[in-house]
Image: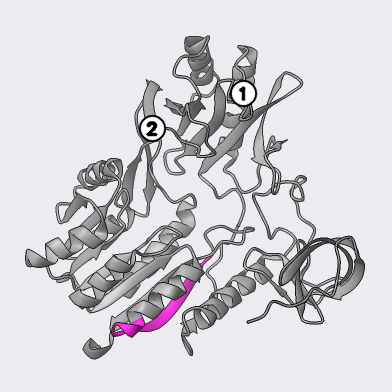
Amino acid sequence: MAKLEAPINKNDVIEVTFEDLTHEGAGVAKVDGFPLFVPNGLPGEQAQIKIVKVKKGYGYGKILEFYKKSPDRIEPVCPIYKQCGGCQLQHLSCEAQLKFKQKQVKEVLTRIGHLENITVHPVLGMKDPWKYRNKSQVPVGEIEGGLVAGFFQQRSHTIINMEECLIQAEENDRVVQGVKRIAEKYGMRAYNEETHSGTLRHIVTRYGRKTQDVMVVLITRTENFQHKDKIIDDIHEAFPQVKSIIQNINSKRTNVIFGDKTKVLWGDEYLYDSIGDIQFAISARSFYQVNPEQTKVLYDKALEYAKLSGEETVIDAYCGIGTISLFLAQKAMKVYGVEIVPEAIEDAKRNAKLNGMTNVEFEVGKSEEIIPAWHQQGIKADVIVVDPPRKGCDTELLETIIKMKPKRVVYVSCNPGTLARDLRILEDGGFKTIEVQPVDMFPHTNHVECVVSTYLADDK
């Protein structure tokens, strides 16, 4: 298809009416069919915009003035919302956010997966969609010799200093800012990515909502740094709720947050928390859902879609530290979990033992290699659960699932685009998608989580 010829030029000032939102939450307007993406615009709004960039087939603009505003528009409560890149939808009412996310899932399933007439339920939201994140990863920088800690400004590496984040647990905010002040007190320098100098790169905190304990992770460029013992003493004296101080060393020129080496500076190696009746030991680098309240909603729905009677064998194909596996083990006869990260499998085994669950086995490796080997050993799965990263399932894994023919596949997804792609492959392989339940795991952001129920078409 030929690219549309741009009917506008950079720096043009024009009037537009917004028709839709992108999956990232930007307003969509069209000039003679040529799409323009404009942050902060909402469907139905009329505005004067300035064109800031023109590319082949689309352009970008910024709003100069509104002529008509949407009834769904609200005033963002966060004072740095327009500068910070952490949230994208605070200017949209909570009810409208849920409708937007449901519409997004429906459209992506149709456009990418060619899945028609699939039931996409209304999004399950939170009663109080604030202060929900139990993990904070905050970059550290310097301004005129002093340390700043906050989030990166949109599309930049400029750090917006932040005393409070309205979607972070209050305990995380307090501890991050306290650690920043203690580091500053002892002259600790922030990492400079341009010169690859300085020490402190990020401050990471994890908060156990059930235990109310906190883990602090100092991510540093070098293993040794001045006044280490004094900094450690000041942190745990200032914050009695801190039970663990960890150091992670990342000496590389990279935007990746964590390095390869992690060590305990003081206290416990693990933070403990619970989702429902299941307790988890969480290490500094464990993947653990950041919104435990909505995680229980998500996992309860996955358990419902698995339709377990106590006689089934279940495979959890991306088991991580065993979060979904242990939920499934409450109702299944046997659960097998596989995960490519060795440390995660060690955590999963520890968590099974912590909860006294003996009907779970975990193995390190690629799902597309381990699961066929299990099949050859005579392990026949009645249900397979997948909860892949944003890139979706590996094609080999999907082909393996199709060959194994489990009665049901429960797909937990954090990316509607790759979900739609993978469901199309499963449909072509003989599975039927029944229903999709979106869950608002990350209010005020453009992200949406989904749980999908599918069954083997000839085995209903």
**Measured along the vertical axis of the image, is residue 232 above or below residue 241?**
above
Q: Secondary structure at mark 2?
A: loop
Residue 426 placement (x, y as % from top left): 33, 78
Magenta-drawn stretch, dominant element (helix, strand or loop) = strand
Dot 2 corresponds to which residue? 260
The colour scheme of the drawn protein is: one colour
Dot 1 corresponds to which residue? 190
**Measured along the vertical axis of the image, is residue 127 above or below residue 80?**
below
Residue 169 placement (x, y as % from top left): 57, 43
**Measured along the vertical axis of the image, is residue 37 above or below residue 265?**
below
The kind of residue on which mark 2 rests is Asp
Residue 132 vs residue 55, the one in the foreground: 55
Q: Write down the quadrant of residue 444 in the picture.
A: bottom right
Q: Determine whether label 1 and label 2 are within 8 Å by CB.
A: no
**Measured along the vertical axis of the image, is residue 93 above or below residue 187?**
below
Residue 414 placement (x, y as % from top left): 47, 62
Q: Is residue 188 visible?
A: yes
Looking at the rendered structure, the number of numbered marks drawn on it comes to 2
The quadrant of the picture occupied by the N terminus is bottom right
> Which stretch is magenta?
427-439
Residue 312 placement (x, y as % from top left): 17, 71
Q: Write down the quadrant of residue 146 in the picture.
A: top right
Q: Secondary structure at mark 1?
A: loop
- Badge 2: residue crowd in 10 Å (few <14, some 14–19, many ≥20): few
- CA gap between label 1 and label 2 equals 20 Å
Closer to the N terminus: mark 1 or mark 2?
Answer: 1
438 drawn magenta: yes
